[in-house]
Image (cartoon, rainbow, N blue to C red):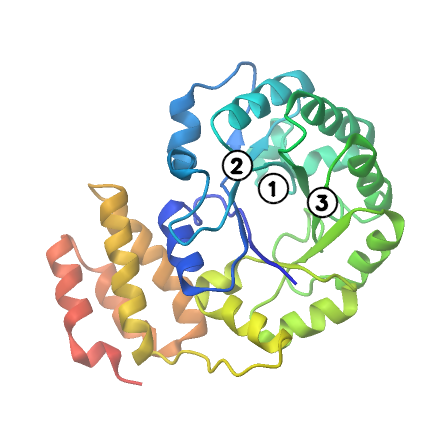
Amino acid sequence: MRVLLAPMQGLVDAPMRALLTGMGGVDVCVTEFVRVTHHVLPAKTFYRLCPELLHGGRTPAGAPVLVQLLGSDPVCLADNAARAAELGAPGVDLNFGCQAPTVNRHRGGAILLREPALLYAIVRAVRAATPADVPVTAKMRLGYDDASLALVCAQALEAGGAAEIVVHARTKVEGYRPPAHWDWIARIREAVRVNVVANGEVWTRQDARACLAASGSRDVMLGRGLVARPDLARQIVADARSEAAPALDWPAMQPVVWRMWALLQDYADGAYPQARLKQWLALVAQAFPAARPLLQAVRRCATAGEVEAHLQAPAFWAP
């Protein structure tokens, strides 16, 4: 069993990948998407979204980080995949799942699930342009409006040369609304021979157990659930091995929050660390209601010093 960290745009950046892989249980990460349009992107663009390329393509904890590309031009995507491989990407992932309206209006992400032939052409071109030892994978939703083309799309990805397919078990129109249709992942698994990774609406170890049972997949990709509860991957792996892994309570999250703050400050200056910490704590508060007072206090902070004063205050870490 493997646990993969989902490529969530505007949320899972290098500091988040470092934090979550450092917690244990995560085997593979995927970057936020690299938007590909009409030209080969400069190295600095890849390094900005995947600074791990400067360190062997791995997080500090050693998890490989695949570079995800998003676009609709097979030739341009292939050229950029070759560039990513030259820069040391341990794998290239293709985004056919993004549901952002702006992305879809510009023929990127989930809108391409209406065109299985184009999916095939993209994967085939990217596979041909990258070294044989660099895997090409793909992430898809069940479809755009509905799941009527889900099996055809998955088969097109496989035929093009995708080594693995991650299936977010919802359509674009469904967005992130529960439930995720894990039974559809099982149908896709029956339609292709490559490995299919289950994704969607896994917030607890019980959700993971149910997802894997319904989908028949051996691997799971975690998104918001892992960001909200950083020890979730570790819990899921322990559960699969019938081992004990007590979940962190809110007081035990204090060093985790401090670690995230330090990672953000090392990564960028200006307003970035505070903005990302506030964004992350908003998700954390969904899993840890006791985090809400700290979230409200940090939201009012104007300086890094104010943030750190709150992080040090014992009152915010009471169970």
Instruction: Classify 10 Å Cα crowding around label 1: few (below 14), some (14-19), many (20 and above).
Output: many
Residue position marked by numbered label 2 in the rendering: 33
Q: What numbered label is drawn on residue 98?
A: 1
Residue position marked by numbered label 3 in the rendering: 164
Q: Nearer the viewer, residue 187 or 27?
A: 27
Q: Quadrant of the N terminus?
A: bottom right
Query: Could you tell me if the residues under marks 1 and 2 are in contact, i.e. CB atoms within 8 Å?
Result: yes
Instruction: Classify 10 Å Cα crowding around label 2: few (below 14), some (14-19), many (20 and above).
Output: many
The residues tagged by marks 1 and 3 sit, at their Cα atoms, a distance apart of 18 Å
Residue 134 x, y percent position in the rendering? 62, 33
Can you tell which quarter of the image residue 208 is in?
Answer: bottom right
Residue at the front extreme of this rendering: 133
Q: Can the viewer see residue 204 in this picture?
A: no
- The vertical placement of 180 against 63, above or below, is below
User: What residue is shown at x 54% (from left), y 57% (from top)?
Assistant: 223
Determine whether the residue tagged by mark 2 lies in a helix, strand or loop. Answer: loop
Frontmost of labels 2 and 3 is 3
Q: Amino acid at mark 2?
A: Phe
Residue 186 x, y percent position in the rendering? 82, 59
Q: Can the viewer see residue 271 in this picture?
A: yes
Instruction: Classify 10 Å Cα crowding around label 3: few (below 14), some (14-19), many (20 and above).
Output: many
Q: Amino acid at mark 3?
A: Glu
Query: Could you tell me if the residues under marks 1 and 3 are in contact, i.e. CB atoms within 8 Å?
Result: no
Frontmost of labels 1 and 3 is 3
